[in-house]
Image (tube, helix red, strand yellow):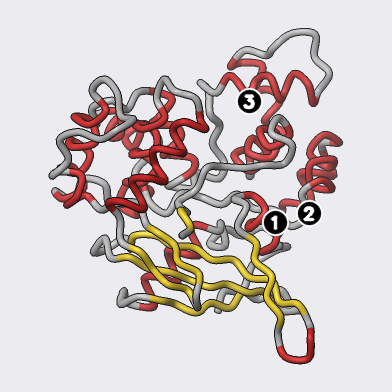
């Protein structure tokens, strides 16, 4: 069981990644639940979880797979941002009317993070210089064709292939240029233990970004994505995300797109949840849709 500190809606998390399921329960009531499938932090083992939220806000989970339960619990908390104290989140809306509007639009929302740094980095490589829909199609095929599957009470999900599979990859339909080479290097780095999510998370910002940019094919934008959305750097800002700048311009009624310095000034009022606000603002450009996540359903 996970006890959120501060407000939290599991349904908002599921809506963010389009993964909310409703199933009849005893007495004809409808029970909503969120299914996730991912590779475990420690051994790259395929794991599935079925999550529900009770009337008091606690999140309950059933684990599918052989990974140690404590590790799965901690990883799930990180993925759902439930390892973050959210009690001060309403105060940000009290200071900033734009944030208040976002909180009303997405009640109880917390960003859903990538399952680990490895998968987030793989997404950066796959999605580079192609349309997001095309990249997602390639990633989902990789999950189904190369990844392990998990059956969650009749709902089959496929995990992204582990590093031992990437180092065997020589070509793959839809991966252009040097992407196969870069994914091979990513798999090697993961097998060497260089992509331990919690270890990277504990590093200072500059050191973590430098280590991530040491991976072939991962530049400034990719390293920030991994840092913010896999390592869950809650009070940091993306400085190379042009779509965020456009969202800020629209939300704050600015005559021009803010530069990095102006963004930093505006975002001072978002502390200590600057990443959360940035994610909410990006969602407004996509009609409420969120990230492309680690789910390929069968």
Helix, strand or loop for disc 1: helix
Residue 143 at x, y percent in the picture: 36, 51
The single residue placed furthest to the top in the displayed view is 256
Alpha-carbon neighbours of circle 2 within 10 Å: few (<14), some, or many (≥20)?
A: some
Whether label 3 touches label 2, CB < 8 Å: no
- At 27% from the left and 51% from the top, the residue drawn is 146
Which of marks 2 and 3 precedes in the sequence?
Answer: 2
Residue 8: image quadrant is: bottom right
Q: Are marks 2 and 1 in contact (CB under 8 Å)?
A: yes
Provide the secondary structure element on which disc 2 rests: loop
- Per the image, the residue denoted by label 2 is 107
Label 3, secondary structure: give it: helix
Residue 244 circle label: 3
Residue 12 - label: 1
- Local packing at callout 1 (Cα closer than 10 Å; few below 14, some 14-19, many 20+) is some
Closer to viewer: mark 1 or mark 3: 1
């Amino acid at each position: 069981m996970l006890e959120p500190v501060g407000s939290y809606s599991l349904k908002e998390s599921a809506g963010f990644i389009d993964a909310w399921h409703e199933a009849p329960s005893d007495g004809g009531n409808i029970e909503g639940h969120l299914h996730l499938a991912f590779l475990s932090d420690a051994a790259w083992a395929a794991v599935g979880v079925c999550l529900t939220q009770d009337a008091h806000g606690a999140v309950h989970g059933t684990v599918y797979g052989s990974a140690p339960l404590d590790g799965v619990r901690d990883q799930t908390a990180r993925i759902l941002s439930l390892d973050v104290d959210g009690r001060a989140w309403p105060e940000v809306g009290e200071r900033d009317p734009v944030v208040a509007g976002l909180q009303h639009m997405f009640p109880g929302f917390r960003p859903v993070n990538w399952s680990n740094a490895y998968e987030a980095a793989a997404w950066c490589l796959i999605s580079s210089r192609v349309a997001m829909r095309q990249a997602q199609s390639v990633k989902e095929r990789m999950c189904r064709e190369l990844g392990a599957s998990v059956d969650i009470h009749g709902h089959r999900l496929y995990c992204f292939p582990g590093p031992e599979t990437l180092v065997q990859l020589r070509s793959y339909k839809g991966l252009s240029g040097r992407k196969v080479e870069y994914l091979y290097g990513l798999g090697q780095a993961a097998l060497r233990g260089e992509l331990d999510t919690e270890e990277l998370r504990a590093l200072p910002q500059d050191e973590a970004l430098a280590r991530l940019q040491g991976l072939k094919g991962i530049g400034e934008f990719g390293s920030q994505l991994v840092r913010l959305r896999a390592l869950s750097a809650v009070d940091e800002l993306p400085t190379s995300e042009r779509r965020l700048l456009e969202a800020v311009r629209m939300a704050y009624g600015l005559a021009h797109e803010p530069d990095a310095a102006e963004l930093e000034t505006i975002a001072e009022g978002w502390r200590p949840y600057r990443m959360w606000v940035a994610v909410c603002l990006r969602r407004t450009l996509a009609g409420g849709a969120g990230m492309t996540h680690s789910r390929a359903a069968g």
